[in-house]
Amino acid sequence: LPAAAALGASFGVLARTAHLGALAAVVMSATTFAGSAQVAAVSVLGAGGGVAAAVGAALLLNARYAPIGISVAQSFRGRVVTRLAQAQLVVDESWALAGGGTARFDRRVMLGVGGTLWIGWVGGTALGALAGKAVGDPSSFGLDGAFAALFVALLVAQLSDRTRVTTAAAGAAIAALLIPFVPAGIPIIAASTAVLVGWRRGT
Amino acid sequence: MSPAWIAVVAVGAGTFALKAVGPVGVSGRRLPGRLQSLLELIAPAILAALVVSETFGRGRGLALDARLLGVAFGLVAVALRAPLWAIVLAGACGTALARLVS
C-alpha cells in the first residue's frame, strides 16, 4: 500500500507538470488503474505530443490486459456487472501475486491485492497532484529519471525469453530512429510494429 | 473538453474494455495461439521504446544527460532484485545526484 501510494504520488506530480489538473489525474488513476500506461500518456502530452498519440501509446501498452484477462477468465463468476467491476482490479502485480500464469489462479487474492493497490494508487495520485505545486521543480528531484527507471524495471520483468528480448531491441531501435523526426508519442506507437520481428522469429 | 480530459476519458474507456474482454467476453474460450503471442509481445516492444524516449528523448532529439545515471542506479536496483518502488527511487536519486554535481 505505501509503495503504490508513493508511485501514485509521483504520477500526480508528473501529471501537474504535463498540465493535467488534479481532478483529471485522480480520475485517470481511478478509472485507468494502470500506472505504466498513465505515465506513458501523460509523458507524451507533456512532451507536446498530440492527444491521439498519447491515447494510442497508452492503449497499446494496455493491450496486454486482453490476453492476461483471458488467461484468468475462467475463475471469474457471477453477474456481468460483478465480473466487469472485478476485472478492473487486474493489474500486473495483483495478477502475478494471485498466481497468474499458473493453474492455481486465486481470484480472491487478486481482488484483495488489486483493491489495496487501487486505494494506494488513487490516494497517492491525489496527494501528489495537490502537493505537486509546493515541492518546486520536480526535475531537481529526478522525477524524469525516476520514470525512466520505472520503465526499465517493467521492461526487465517482461524479458522472459529470447523472442521477447529481440522484440524489445527492435522496439528500442525503432523509437531511437524516429524520435528526431516525428512528434512525441508516434515513435512509441511505431515501436509496436516490432512485434512482427519477434513474431516471425517465434513461429 | 480540454486535450488532457479527452486523453483521460479515452485511455480510461479503452483500458476498461481491454480488461473486460477476458472475464466478461470470452470466459471459457481461448484466443488462437498466434494472436495470443502477438498481443503478449506488444508490451516488451512498447516498454523498450518508452525506456529510450524517457532516458534519451529531449523534444525532437536525443540527448545524454542526468537521466542516464538515474537509469544506471535503477538497473543496479533491478539487479539487486529490489521492489519496484525502490527501483523508481534509485532512478530519482541517480538523476538528482547527477544534476547536483553537474
Image (cartoon, coloured by chain):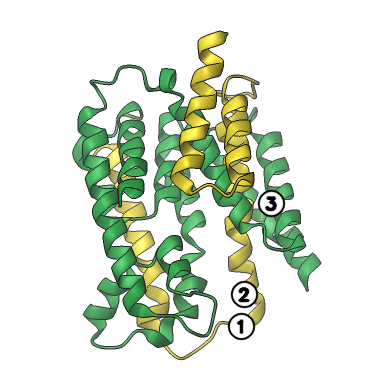
Chain colours: A green, B yellow
Q: At numbered mark 3, what does the secondary structure look like: helix, strand or loop?
A: helix
Residue B37 at least partly seen:
yes
Q: Residue B15, relative to residue B69: is it above or below?
A: below
Kindly identify which chain the residue marked by label 2 belongs to.
B
Q: Secondary structure at mark 1?
A: loop
> What residue is drawn where x is 32% and y is 78%?
A108
Residue A171 percent across, percent down from the top left:
68, 48
| Residue at point 39%, 82% (across, down) | B25
Q: CA distance from mark 2 to mark 1?
A: 6 Å
Where's the C terminus of chain A, which quadrant? bottom right
Farthest front residue in view: B80
* Residue A21 appears anywhere in the view: no
Q: Position of residue A30 (x, y in %)?
A: 25, 54
Contact, mark 2 vs mark 3 (Cβ under 8 Å):
no
Q: Residues within 10 Å of mark 3 (few under 14, many from 20)?
A: many
The kind of residue tagged 2 is: Leu
